[in-house]
Image: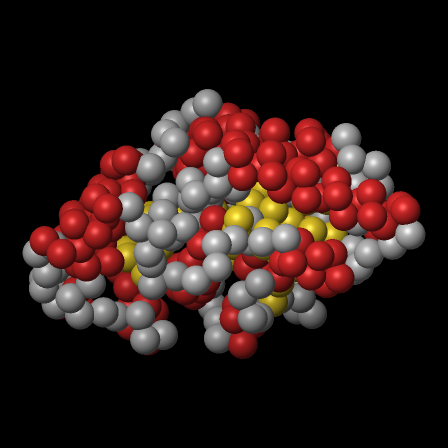
Amino acid sequence: METFIDLRSDTVTQPTPEMLQAIISAQVGDDCSREDPTVNRLEAMAASRLGKEAGLLVPSGTMGNLVSVLAHTHRGDEVIMESECHIYYYEVGSISAVAGVIPRLVKGNHGVLDPDDLKKAIRGEDIHYPTPTLIAVENTHNRGGGTVTSVEQSRAICDVAKDRGLSTHLDGARIFNAAVALGVDARELAQPFDSVMFCLSKGLSAPVGSVVVGSREFIERARKYRKMLGGGMRQAGIIAAAGIVALETMVDRLEEDHINARYLGEGLAEISGIQVELETVQTNMVYFDVGELGFDSVSFLKELEMRKVRASLRPPTGVRMVTHRHISRENISYVLEVVEEIAKSRSVC
């Protein structure tokens, strides 16, 4: 099999040897009957780690966000969220198609919501309007460039919601990246929100799974919706075992990914024809634009692929690269050489 430097996403990470051993030796039971001891341990660990009462293992972040929206809302309600957040942009319209709620979009600053804009977006009671019941926040924000919402910003957003009687949900797929970048405990970022979802299968390197945390009452509602959506699993301890190792061993090393992303971003910014917004390179993502070179996203990715580098596209001329534990400083240096070679070849033409 050919070896590529794969910067498409941190979802490509492989489980560590310790995770694989934990999977082999995991104690398992029927999780639908709450009899899987390893799942129970992971859920309790996740809840404690984020300062909540209870947790729920789900197969994916998308399902985690969906069961959370379902548990917070009723059909016909309005959910306020940032205009390019993952729930709106990448989850197949599930909150409308399945939960029956209406998204109300608010433009953020590189994905970070302004509390004053939220106040303006929350409309008063009117027979013509859907009822706003939930504010959803994404931290880190994918399409914002991997940008972080600070503890203070998070509290201000949740204060707006509380004042207006709305619930809050945090799509914290990469909450530990945000916490590491800010130098705070993840529970500080989670604290003001009623519910939080985070992924085990991205930078934390577990093979599959996400966890939703919140109050016991909320998790009971979410558990029933998980079953409705087909997410009730049997001997799920083989998934949870890797997740436990991920939480115990993989959080602190995320800083290395952030350092490599910064190195990549600063290197790309020095290449003529490549446009990078370095202010957004805050965690493990680097977005850049190749339009000045005369490329669109697809054709540029083909050039990278021929040189054993993979990235993801953001059409029409944007490219995203994501660092993770399989990407070394040497890999980044090679990628920078490749991009510079492509840029120079285009300028010669």
Q: Give the side of residue 91 with respect to residue 218, left or right.
A: right
What scheme was used to colour the molecule?
A: secondary structure
Q: Nearer the viewer, residue 40 or 346?
A: 346
Q: Where 15 sits versus 285, above or below?
A: below
Question: Horizontal and vertical percent for residue 192?
Answer: 44, 37
Residue drawn at (19%, 59%) of the image: 238
Front position in the image: 60 or 171: 60
Q: Is residue 9 visible?
A: no
x 90%, y 46%: residue:
348
**Viewer-side residue, 333 vs 117:** 333
Quadrant position of residue 253? top left
* Frontmost residue, 138 versus 181: 181
The spot of residue 56 in percent (x, y) is 28, 56
Which quarter of the picture shows residue 156? top right
Q: In what quadrant of the picture does the N terminus appear?
A: bottom left
- Residue under the point 66% across and 38% down: 336
Q: Is residue 207 visible?
A: yes
Q: Is residue 187 above or below residue 210?
A: above
Residue that extends furthest to the top in the rendered view of this protein: 183
The x and y percentages for residue 15 are 31, 50
**Residue at image coords 82%, 56%:** 295
Q: How many numbered marks does the figure carry?
A: 0
Reply above or below: 87 against 227: above
In x, y percent, where is residue 319? 69, 51
- Against 308, residue 253 (above or below) is above
Apparent side of residue 48 relative to residue 35 in the rendered image (left or right): right
